[in-house]
Amino acid sequence: MKDARDVILRPMVSEKSYNLLEENVYTFEVARTASKPEIRDAVESIFDVSVLKVNTLNRDGKRRRNRRTGTWGSRPDVKRAYVTLVEGDTIELFEV
């Protein structure tokens, strides 16, 4: 079994993820090889919450041009997980 910290890499910070917090949906960057059951177990063990469902998506990295040499490269590919929690559970991610 994988370590939970190897599955969940970091929370995603964007305007869309902030809007989803109102619906009790949290967005995380996860390992490319992580499956939905692994993501569910990792979130439940790290944050001590109950997960209702997990949706994942793979995003290809953007193509970027190197201005000095004129060659093309790309940003890394990213896998995201949208984790919906049971009503009443919350994760204290951005609390001050």
Image: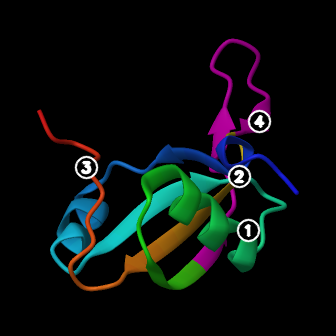
**In the visual, does 66 lie left or right of 48?**
right
Mark 3–mark 1 Cα distance, whole angstroms, equals: 21 Å
Residue 50 pos. (x, y %): 44, 76
Which of marks 3 and 2 precedes in the sequence? 2
User: How far across and down, in percent of the image, does residue 55 sit?
Assistant: 56, 82
The residue singled out by tag 1 in the image is 38
Q: Residue at x 76, y 16 (%)?
A: 69
Spatial CA distance of label 4 from label 3 is 36 Å
At 30% across and 53% down in the image, what residue appears? 14
Q: Which quarter of the figure has residue 43? A: bottom right
Residue at 52% across, 50% down: 46
Residues at marks 1 and 2 touching, judged by CB atoms closer than 8 Å: yes
- State yes or no: discs 4 and 2 in contact (Cβ < 8 Å): no
Q: Quadrant of the C terminus?
A: top left
Q: Secondary structure at mark 2?
A: helix
- Please provide percent x and percent y for residue 94: 22, 42
Which region shows up in magenta? Answer: 56-74
* Neighbours of disc 4 within 10 Å: few (<14), some (14-19), many (20+): few
How far is disc 4 from disc 2 in space, using C-alphas?
26 Å
The answer to whether the residues at label 3 and label 1 have Cβ atoms under 8 Å apart is: no
Q: At numbered mark 4, what does the secondary structure look like: helix, strand or loop? A: strand
Q: Depth check: 5 or 67 in front?
A: 5
> What amino acid is found at the position of numbered circle 4 in the picture?
Gly
In this rendering, position of residue 61 left or right of residue 52: right
Decide which of tag 4 and tag 3 comes sooner along the chain.
4
Task: Please name the amino acid that badge 3 sits on.
Answer: Glu
Q: Which residue is mark 4?
A: 73
